Image (cartoon, helix red, strand yellow):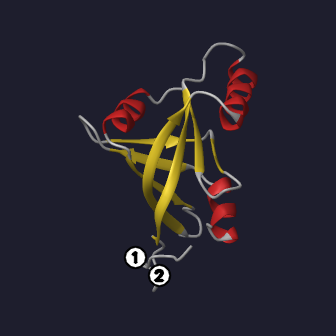
Amino acid sequence: MIPENIKKFLNENLWYVATFGQELNVVPVGFKRVCEDGRLAIGAVLLEATLENIKADSRIAVACADPLTGEAYQLKGSAELLHEGEEYDHYDKLTNDTYKGAMQLKCVIIITPEKIINASPNEHNKEEIEF
């Protein structure tokens, strides 16, 4: 399970998501959260290249940093796309509430983290965090 301090950090800061496919792609995401089971969820509204890449190659990386403190983490894992269920319902409602029907949820990206790496500029940089 992801340590509580890192879960809190991830939930409070913007994520940058990198995917592989026909072309490398990285994008900031704001419709995101750490699920109770330790997986990461992203509501995909505008992530067309990201979704195409995940269909071609499920490998994914997430970077999250606080520019004021320098605290930063990188998570590496695999992604799957969901079109129904609790997480889908959550992000469908959030999308409708936020965009008032002007945009639609495409799906939810569920990330299963395999590695967490400290990316902070300190003596723990590049250390893998056990979870």
Whether 15 is drawn above or below 48: the answer is below
Asked whether 109 or 37 is in front, the reply is 37
Residue 13 lies, in percent from the top left, at: 62, 54
Residue 94 lies, in percent from the top left, at: 72, 30
Query: Which secondary structure lies at badge 2?
Result: loop
Q: CA distance from mark 2 to mark 1?
A: 9 Å
Q: Residue furthest top?
A: 102
Query: Mark 1 sits on what residue?
Result: 126
| Nearer the camera: disc 2 or disc 1 | 1
Quadrant including the N terminus? bottom right
Residue 108 lies, in percent from the top left, at: 57, 34
Query: Mark 2 sits on what residue?
Result: 122
Whether 54 is drawn above or below 83: the answer is below
Residue 59 lies, in percent from the top left, at: 36, 49
Query: Which secondary structure lies at badge 1?
Result: loop
Is residue 77 left or right of 97 when viewed as pictured?
left
Whether 116 is drawn above or below 113: the answer is below
Is residue 122 left or right of 87 when viewed as pictured?
left
* Mark 2, other Cα within 10 Å: few <14 / some 14–19 / many ≥20: few
* Mark 1, other Cα within 10 Å: few <14 / some 14–19 / many ≥20: some
Amino acid on which the number 1 mark rests in the picture: Lys
Quadrant including the C terminus? bottom right
Q: Quadrant of residue 56?
A: top left
